[in-house]
Amino acid sequence: MPEGHVTHRLARALTGTFGQHEVGVSSPQGRFAESAALLDGHVLAGAESFGKNLFVEFRTGLPETFLHIHLGLIGKFNLAPAAPPQGIVRLRISDGQTAADLRGPQTCALVSAARCDEVVAALGPDPIRDDADPDGGYARVRRSGKSIAALLMDQKVAAGVGNIFRAEVLFRHRRNPMTPGNRISAKEWASMYADLSQLMRRAVEVGSIDTVRDEHLPEAMGRAPRDDVHGGEVYVYRRTGQPCHVCGTPVKSAIVESRNLYWCSTCQRRR
């Protein structure tokens, strides 16, 4: 599932490409045709992201002026030079030169500002946003006996954090992923959240998730770069059985919250 930096990059791209311009909106697939017709030919005011939720605002004069998009597990939203749509395209936004095609989203709905507020209110703090309050996420962590690995996948704890960021931030803080949330101090949560904010903001800028410190980069260690379709240099994510970059212990994995969790049993002993 795309993590929060992906939707923030999309919000920037949509605003930068179409912001304050009239756009064509269509549904080549047909499933969103009725709502697309209400937006077609109107001004796209801008786009904004909260966690993994993307909101695109249009000036239509109607009560429902926001596109709410959640990519889910398989969704893709790509911008490219305008050409005939390929494959199953739920939604297309185009200015004639550039087209943004949405495929396979979990959510694609035309909603009101009030509904947007409801969605955002149900989320925890987004580490990429300046207006987020990390204490809101910690309030849930400190009351819970669930593992910190499970809690970090809860969008009410840290909106936008997914499988990669949870594994990597726990490694970077040497925290055993099975530690109950109520054993995490406020000081440690603040440090972990600040680290997430730094990592996720960088991912917005560069378009990939890189979590490895300078001293553990391939050129510093004399090792081969990571060879993975996800790209980026990481410590444990999708590295099951491979040696830890810090201690050499084979990386472990297990299913937590229906997703594969990765960790180093030597570096992450702290419970």
Image: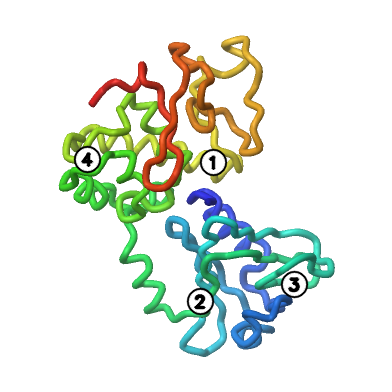
Q: Amino acid at mark 2?
A: Phe
Q: Name the disc covering residue 32, or none.
A: none
- Quarter location, residue 58: bottom right
Mark nearer the viewer, 2 or 3: 2
In primary-sequence order, the first of circles 3 and 1 is 3
Q: Secondary structure at mark 4?
A: helix
Q: Is residue 203 visible?
A: yes
Residue that label 1 marks: 203
Image quarter in which the C terminus is found: top left
Residue that label 2 marks: 66
For disc 1, the neighbor class at 10 Å (few under 14, some 14 to 19, many from 20) is many
In primary-sequence order, the first of circles 3 and 4 is 3
Question: Vertically, is 189 above or below 110?
Answer: above
Q: Secondary structure at mark 1?
A: helix
What residue do we see at 47% from left, 18% from top?
Answer: 250
Nearer to me, 52 or 200: 52
Q: CA distance from mark 2 to mark 1?
A: 26 Å
Q: CA distance from mark 3 to mark 4?
A: 48 Å
Q: Secondary structure at mark 3?
A: loop
Residue that label 4 marks: 181
- Quarter location, residue 175: top left
Colour logic: rainbow
Q: Amino acid at mark 3?
A: Asp
For disc 3, the neighbor class at 10 Å (few under 14, some 14 to 19, many from 20) is some
Nearer to me, 18 or 81: 81
Across the whole image, how many numbered discs are drawn on residues?
4
